[in-house]
């Protein structure tokens, strides 16, 4: 079938919105009419070359849509199902999936690195016959997508598509980091470094988990103001004085600190802002060449924990419904993260706003 999508052909961009041929779904795959796709820094890191991916590639990994076709053979999905697409197509049978750590799925990671669907196929084709790669098994900056059914989670029919899309990355990554990776519990003092969609989702989840103090840290004043409106108890301007400010506000360091920036220097700050016995969680994706320097003695003498979190340590088919239920109950108001809706042809404008810090979470509505 003929569709349109935003293709990255070279590092630095821009994305080019072009006509594409989309092959029909194979066994275990779905044809999805994409209804909304969020703009995320993970997309931006592919555009600027921080995350090396095979090109050309149709970007977009945080998406929601409607199933309009299924591949040959039985399928757990039906035409008309509303689905959220997550960026790790978990196979369900590797050692990590069996252990309940689907974010580390080995076949899913291999497919994502190769720019294919879980089964190793590429279903997209440019007019000249070139086959663009899939971005994290989704390629949501398009009118239609073929995805592995293992990338999809069914959601309620009345969940708005623009809100639903956020559950595919921002909410899974941010809320999962707070609930699971950091293990925020009632009474915790929490700090969040970086207040994009992921960071604000972490903030919302920390409050939902019962944190009594949430310190919001960012260089952009408008994001700090939004964080206060969403329940942060304190705000700190990002920069060289942030560590001392957080430690002062939390009485010697926060119990749980979540870094969402993907900046190695900020991760160091997040660790230094964590108190004795505390946990520092990082979810950002720095350039592979970046290194961090930390006071090694503190890991033992202060019983500190430093850990990474990918996909919020979530299992999408378990956690998307859980987080949607919290949203519907008013405990995770993720709709407040939406800062704009764009046509597919406006995607480059959206990334300019994202890079400048002007926007939190924009969605492309093709």
Image (tube, rainbow, N blue to C red):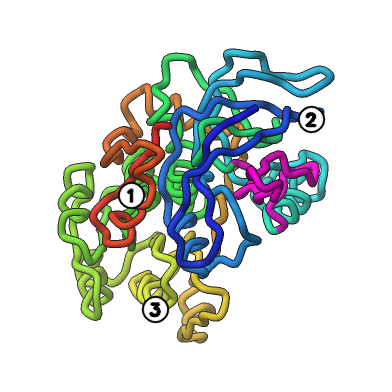
Q: 78 left or right of 267?
A: right
Residue 146 location, x and y as percent? 66, 33
Q: Kindly report the distance in space between the C-alpha atoms of the residues bearing marks 2 and 1.
A: 33 Å
Is residue 84 among what the camera can see?
A: yes
Q: 189 left or right of 294?
A: left
Disc 3 marks which residue? 265
- The part of the image, by quadrant, that contains residue 355 is bottom left
Disc 2 marks which residue? 26
Q: Helix, strand, or loop for circle 1?
A: helix
Q: Is residue 133 magenta?
A: yes
Disc 1 marks which residue? 350
Is residue 306 among what the camera can see?
A: no
Residue 92 location, x and y as percent? 77, 39
Q: Nearer the viewer, residue 342 or 317?
A: 342
**Magenta region, main secondary structure:** loop
Q: Helix, strand, or loop for circle 2?
A: loop
Q: Are marks 2 and 1 in contact (CB under 8 Å)?
A: no
Magenta-colored span? 114-138
Position of 329 relative to 123 (above/below): above
Q: Kindly report the distance in space between the C-alpha atoms of the residues bearing marks 3 and 2.
A: 44 Å
């Amino acid at each position: 079938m003929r569709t349109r999508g935003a293709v990255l052909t070279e590092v630095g961009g821009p994305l080019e919105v072009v006509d594409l041929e989309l092959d029909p779904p194979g066994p275990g795959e779905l044809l999805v009419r994409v209804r909304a796709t969020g703009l995320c820094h993970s997309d931006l890191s592919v555009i600027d070359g921080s995350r090396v991916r095979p090109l050309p590639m149709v970007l977009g990994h945080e998406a929601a849509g409607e199933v309009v076709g299924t591949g040959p053979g039985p399928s757990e999905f039906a035409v008309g199902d509303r689905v959220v697409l997550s960026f790790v197509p978990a196979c369900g049978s590797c050692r990590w999936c069996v252990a309940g750590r689907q974010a580390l799925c080995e076949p899913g990671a291999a497919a994502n690195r190769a720019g294919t669907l879980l089964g190793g196929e590429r279903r997209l084709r440019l007019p000249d016959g070139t086959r663009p790669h899939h971005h994290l098994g989704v390629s949501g900056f398009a009118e239609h997508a073929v995805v592995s059914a293992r990338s999809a989670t069914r959601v309620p029919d009345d969940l708005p598509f623009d809100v639903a899309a956020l559950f595919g990355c921002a909410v899974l990554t941010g809320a999962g980091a707070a609930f699971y990776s950091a293990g925020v519990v009632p009474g915790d003092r929490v700090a969040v470094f970086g207040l994009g969609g992921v960071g604000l989702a972490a903030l919302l989840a920390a409050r939902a988990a019962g944190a009594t103090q949430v310190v919001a840290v960012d260089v952009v004043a408008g994001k700090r103001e939004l964080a206060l409106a969403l329940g942060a108890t304190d705000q700190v301007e990002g920069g060289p004085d942030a560590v001392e400010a957080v430690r002062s506000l939390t009485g010697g360091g926060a119990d749980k600190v979540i870094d969402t920036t993907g900046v190695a220097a900020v991760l160091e700050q997040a660790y230094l802002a964590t108190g004795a016995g505390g946990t520092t969680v990082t979810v950002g994706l720095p350039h592979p060449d970046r290194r961090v320097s930390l006071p090694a003695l503190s890991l033992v003498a202060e019983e500190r924990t430093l850990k990474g979190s990918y996909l919020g340590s979530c299992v999408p088919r378990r956690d998307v419904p859980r987080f949607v239920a919290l949203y519907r109950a008013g405990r995770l108001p993720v709709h407040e993260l939406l800062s704009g809706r764009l046509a597919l042809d406006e995607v480059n404008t959206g990334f300019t706003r994202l890079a400048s810090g002007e926007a939190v979470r924009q969605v492309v509505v093709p």
